[in-house]
């Protein structure tokens, strides 16, 4: 992990477009952040549901990429929206539910301050089996 | 619908940031589009899973906003990724599975040319009941 | 399919316990049925949500078993409950959304007369890859 | 809770048919059990996926019924199958992710000894709003 340059990793990607940044990756967890601006809102002025789904999808895919053997792609993203957010910071913390040879299932929780705004399960499939 | 200005509706929002445009809204359907650029990619050069989830979330929320009584918010987004895309256009077509008083369930299908890339179910809840 | 004896196939299993019967299997579809009795109810006298999930799970697993190469196991069952049922017959009709080498995604619709009571997506994984 | 007779509550229902028993209900949790017999198997001799989905559905619905105000019905059951089981006991433990006025989201974990076999999210909707 030491030499990883995450800024470079996501440079020019969708995560760079919407300002999603990796803070920390460990074998069993990842932490990412996003500073909310009006660019993340839907028309009612709340954070767009797609922002939460995108953060979970990316965080979990990147954690698998950096910590697991194999080539992993997302096959399902199931996100529940629990509380709306308008401003401040979103923190996404994800950890695995099951790491298998063919399939991984992770869960991400996304917080705005102490509020749990969204919870997401992402299933990844190994292209190398 | 005739006087609706969707460009204005999504101006300054997340959908404007990632280039997601409403093409047509009818009572039982919505059609939207996105022109893929590298800004929509994940690090492997494929369209980011969050783009599909965001398109489904937005398309279905906007269809409910413009065609149904009540104030509807997304409570769940369940997106399956079926085939990757790199370039060209994404077309999202959504229609309702069930329209209830308290809850709506819609399904979105997202195509890249004739390939079905993602299928998504979004559940909306009525804040006015 | 001609020589298949589905009664024998499910004999002594959970499907036999709750009276779930295969009517017809084709390459791209399966049709099953259940005659509702009070044994299928939850305490309020409506069909138990688990009955719908079980029917979808079984129908799709059996269709994969009889029509696809490989050894397929369910990894996710996502069932939406749309309308309650009390009596009569439940008919489950399922067809594939995507048949891949590693993964299959099917959708089941369960009807009570003409009412769509539940819709379910089941993902199967191939143990042979 | 003191006077509740859960045996009576589920008497004659689907849970009685497949031998699913409530062990303990508290405000923020429920614990249930099932003794696996061949009646719970699918044709390969493993516990049928529908059994896990049914246990989660019932456990969470009963916890809401006994501990929350309102009339709650399940609208979605999303169950991931993590590890197969053949014999012994299944223990289901569920707790709420979010308790809202209109909607509740709970998570159930189902164990066979120390193995986590399935994890399930169930969303309930309040018919009284």
Image (cartoon, coloured by chain):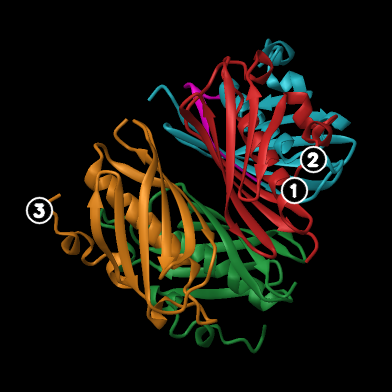
Chain colours: A orange, B green, C cyan, D red
Q: Nearer the viewer, residue A55 or C104?
A: A55
Chain to which the residue tagged by mark 2 belongs: D
Q: Is residue A41 above or below residue A126?
A: below
Question: As drawn, is A68 to the left or to the right of D60?
Answer: left
Residue A3: numbered disc: 3
Q: How many marks?
A: 3
The span from disc 2 to disc 1 (Cα, nearest Å) is: 9 Å
Instruction: Pinpoint residue C93: horizontal percent, then vertical percent.
Output: 71, 36
**In what element is the residue under mark 3?**
loop
Is residue C23 visible in the rendered structure shown here?
A: no
Mark 1 lies on residue? D66
Q: For the residues labelled 2 and 1, say whether their Cβ atoms are less than 8 Å apart.
A: yes
Residue at (85, 46) in percent of width and height: C114
The span from disc 2 to disc 3 (Cα, nearest Å) is: 60 Å
**In what element is the residue under mark 2?**
loop
Q: Nearer the viewer, residue C16 or C3?
A: C16
Residue at (24, 37) in percent of width and height: A69
Is residue A38 visible in the rendered structure shown here?
A: yes
Q: Is residue D91 magenta?
A: no
* Residue farthest along the left direction in this orientation: A3
Residue at (74, 76) in percent of width and height: B69
Label 1 Cα crowd, 10 Å radius (few <14 / some 14-19 / many 20+)? few
Q: For the residues labelled 2 and 3, say whether their Cβ atoms are less than 8 Å apart.
A: no
Q: Image quarter for residue D48?
A: top right
Query: What secondary structure is the stretch in magenta mostly built from?
Result: strand
**In what element is the residue under mark 1?**
helix
* Residue farthest along the right direction in this orientation: C88
Mark 2 lies on residue? D4
Magenta stretch: give its range. Answer: C67-79
Residue A8: numbered disc: none
């Amino acid at each position: 992990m030491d030499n990883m340059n995450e800024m470079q990793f996501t440079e020019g990607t969708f995560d760079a477009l919407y300002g999603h940044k990796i803070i920390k990756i460990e074998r069993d967890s990842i932490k990412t952040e996003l500073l909310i601006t009006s660019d993340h809102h839907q028309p009612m002025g709340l954070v767009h549901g797609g922002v939460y789904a995108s953060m979970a999808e990316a965080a979990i895919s990147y954690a698998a990429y950096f910590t697991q053997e194999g080539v992993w792609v997302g096959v399902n993203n199931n996100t529940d929206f629990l509380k709306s957010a308008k401003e401040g910071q979103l923190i996404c913390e994800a950890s695995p539910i099951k790491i298998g040879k063919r399939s991984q299932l992770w869960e991400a929780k996304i917080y705005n301050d102490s509020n749990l705004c969204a919870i997401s399960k992402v299933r990844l499939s190994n292209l190398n089996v």
